[in-house]
Amino acid sequence: GIFVADPPPYLNRFAVVYPSMPGERGWSRFHKAFRAECENLFRKHPQIVIEQYFDVHPHLPGADYERLLEDIRCQRLAGLMLHRDTSFLLEHPDVRDSGMPVVGVYYTPQELPGHPVVNSNYAMFLERMFDVFKQKNRQRLACLTMKSFNHQLTLERIREEGLQTPPQWMCSTGRDHENHVGGLVRLLFDYPPEERPDALAIVDDNLVEETLGTLISMGLLVGRDLDVVIHCNWPLPAPSFLPVTHLGVHIHDFLYLAIKLILAQRLGKKLQGEMLVPDIFEQEMRVREPLNFDLKELLAEAREFVAEPAEVSAV
């Protein structure tokens, strides 16, 4: 006979779509942490199934791409969490015609109009980063970022805080040129102590090893010559034996909000706009209460969901 699973797959199977394969070009620390936490979530809450699809891009459709489309056609999924560079799927007829709930991960609302997105709270990151450097009496701040970074917005906030940051101290590199960051670090710090930065923000944790290794090779000591704040992805920050400050988002927060947004859409709510995940320090990450991923409670919360910008609790 025919039976319906409890819960049915359109309420408990969530797709996470990545543009690349683990370990290949384009695979970031954020992807690595996201993948690990998806697997960890299923071990702790087996009623929530996270299906992960890798190397999904339009040029060379592979096995996971075809598996994803088949799962969408057969309505085996509650919804899609799209990482950056996978939004082309929204133009595919099978996706467009399915009415499948979609949540963008690290998109802006302008990049994914008509769909809700989950993003880090960059304004919060800046404020908490400034607090760290103020406490350490640092005055000259440099930033290392990826090329998509909004330099002008950041420079305005830095100047409002009274810190010294010439435009050339806002340095970017592309995803395919992370190994060039050492040259940028040498350009920044090859000056007398009173002229070079005494504070450094590494705003993308894919740049950490090359940056810190270059500082060491130059004879600079973190904690003496400069202080460093690194944006990270809890619970998998870039490892370092140096006295750096890690400040970043917790992947559980992304998953929690994305699942709730998908369930709310499944219940008929029309959602768009941005949900913000807070940046937290290591000590906050260690003491905070775990989020509740009970599916029945998530469904109950989704029924009350309000489509307004919000933050999950930082502690």
Image (cartoon, rainbow, N blue to C red):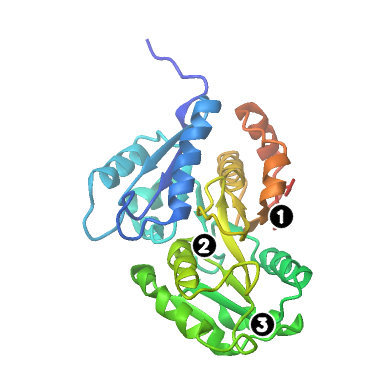
- The structure residue drawn at horizontal position 46% and vertical position 19%, both measured from the top left corner, is 4
The answer to whether residue 12 of the structure is visible from this angle is: no
- The structure residue drawn at horizontal position 70% and vertical position 37%, both measured from the top left corner, is 301
**Alpha carbon distance from label 1 to label 3:** 33 Å
Place of residue 241 in the rendered image (x, y in percent of width and height, measured from the top left): 54, 54
| Quadrant in which the N terminus is drawn | top left
Q: Nearer the viewer, mark 1 or mark 3?
A: 3
Residue marked by disc 2: 107
Disc 2: CA contacts within 10 A as few (<14), some (14-19) or many (>=20):
many
**Alpha carbon distance from label 1 to label 2:** 16 Å
Q: Secondary structure at mark 2?
A: loop
Which numbered circle lies on residue 140? Answer: 3
Q: Nearer the viewer, residue 275 or 264?
A: 275
The kind of residue tagged 1 is Ala
Q: Is residue 73 above or below residue 274?
A: above
Place of residue 72 in the rendered image (x, y in percent of width and height, measured from the top left): 37, 41
Q: Secondary structure at mark 3?
A: loop
Answer with left or right where residue 4 lies relative to residue 88: right
Q: Secondary structure at mark 1?
A: loop
| Quadrant in which the C terminus is drawn | top right
- Comes first in the chain, label 1 or label 2: 2
Q: Is residue 100 above or below residue 295?
A: below
The kind of residue tagged 3 is Arg
In the rendered image, the residue lying farthest to the front is 219
Q: Nearer the viewer, residue 3 or 88?
A: 88
Q: Nearer the viewer, residue 291 or 128?
A: 128
The kind of residue tagged 2 is Tyr
Q: Is residue 46 above or below residue 115?
A: above
Which numbered circle lies on residue 310? Answer: 1
